[in-house]
Amino acid sequence: MRVVWRRLLLGLVMLVVACGSGAQEEEPQLSLVPLPASVTRLQNGFTLKAGDTVTSAEPSVAAQLIHGIEADTGLELKLGAKGRIRLDLDAPQAGTEGYELTVDADGARISAATPEGLFRGAQTFRQLARVPAIPGVRVSDRPRFAWRGAMLDVARHFRPVADVKRFVDLMAAYKLNVLHLHLTDDQGWRIAIPGWPGLTGIGAATEVGGGPGGFYTAADYREIVRYAQERFVRVVPEVDVPGHTNAALASHPELNCDGVAPEPYTGIKVGFSALCPGKAETARFLNDVLKELAALTPGHHLHIGGDEVEKLSEREYAQIVELAAQAVTANGKEVVGWQEAGATVLPAGSLVQYWQTNGGPEDVERAVAQGAKVIMSPASRVYLDMKYDDATRVGQTWAGTTEIDDAYDWDPATLIDGIGEDRIEGVEMALWTETVVTMDDLEHLTFPRLPAIAEVAWTPQSERSFDAFAARLAPMATVWDRWGVDYHRSARITWP
């Protein structure tokens, strides 16, 4: 008994000494993803209450912040004058997407140079506001890379407009700004093109496994673009040529060298199809398709694919890719292509997308030598269709399995020798949908890897570590549950 009392007395003495010396518990880590470039804790924050007012120089950004906080917490805020939460366009030094955020006892203030910067700052405040007693903090932030994208394949399995909008919301919450829509492939054609009725009459009626397929009308596509623009996400459509074209070839016999349409295809093999080089119909097809997409797409870029072509010679391949590139530039847009397009003559301002980590980067190096910049999409890191592990219920493993730490622990600027940060436009994850049948399948493969890759693209490399990221990410499971996201409970994260 004496020993017990002595231990209790010693513990009391140590507690008194610690308090007297000013020792205190370490502040809990803020659950912010992607991690801002600079975060400083302040002494006092404030408590957010239902009915608090948001005042903004951009009412549309404020309205989305109000909606987001309600979706995350259930608290209903309002838009009005003299609010405790202010969004101001008074920070010209912040750049296009940068912002400054201060939370103190008086409330919260986001300052930016542009509405886009305000929107990015609003996503950070939204994460802070998931606890009612918002801690005092000062944030100064801007992205590492300008291109922070996610590719959604709607060709292998079609996704209706509502699903694409939900995907945009999930992207925007983590400061992604490019939605790359893979609209065409062997298994399906997903966009209406005037003068080519077979593309939707035949080419859109299939998908992997024999499902019903589907397509977007011009009005559907414009609605996706509008919705994305409101969230400062730009849409980059992809028409994959000269390979991955069986849906087009099955729709219009004149696109085939022998004039005979192949059967529609619902498998997952690649490399077997190609447009016919040297045919006038091929040039007309490329011009018509890319002209329509250019007219529907307000952004600067059109993606022409160019990957995995086995049927054509190098000369034939280059002929078609260069025809497509000329059609893009003739319509006032800039070219994006998969890395194989680097073997052709590319227009000024082109981007190539590195993906093939099981091969050499020679095509990327040839593209860079022509002045192109690179989007980093290494399959072994950011292909979301790769399984987390062998037990994952959907997905593939041809590039290996990719757990969340694999998706996080890499540096785009050191991935390819000689291609440093100055030659990199950004980072883009890709979700191919051979095995993705439902929206739950899509979200299960996307979360929690989307936030991890978003931090790779946004946060300075010097500020990143997986252990710190894991601690910041774990509390987000609570809000994902509120959103109804079917996420993978990775063993690499200590979840709540």
Image (tube, grey):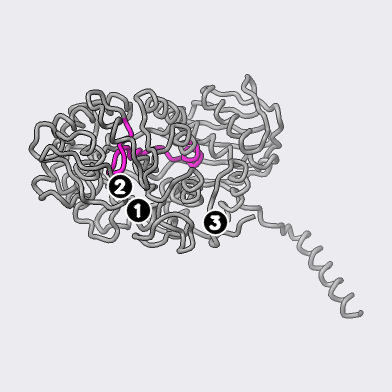
Residue 404, image x, y percentages: 47, 57
Q: Is residue 364 above or below residue 195?
A: below
Q: Nearer the viewer, mark 2 or mark 3?
A: 3
Q: Which portion, as a residue range, is magenta? A: 169-191
Of callouts 1 and 2, the N-terminal one = 1
At 59% from the left and 27% from the top, the residue drawn is: 86
Q: Are marks 2 and 3 in contact (CB under 8 Å)?
A: no
Q: Nearer the viewer, residue 154 or 9?
A: 154
Of callouts 1 and 3, the N-terminal one = 1
**Whole-Å distance between the Cαs marked 1 and 2?**
8 Å
Q: Are marks 1 and 2 in contact (CB under 8 Å)?
A: yes
Q: Is residue 28 above or below residue 280?
A: below
Mark 3 is surrounded, within 10 Å at the Cα level, by few (under 14), some (14 to 19) or many (20 or more) other residues, namely: many
- Kindly identify the amino acid type of the residue bearing the numbered disc 2: Ile
**Whole-Å distance between the Cαs marked 2 and 3?**
26 Å
Q: Nearer the viewer, residue 21 or 93?
A: 93
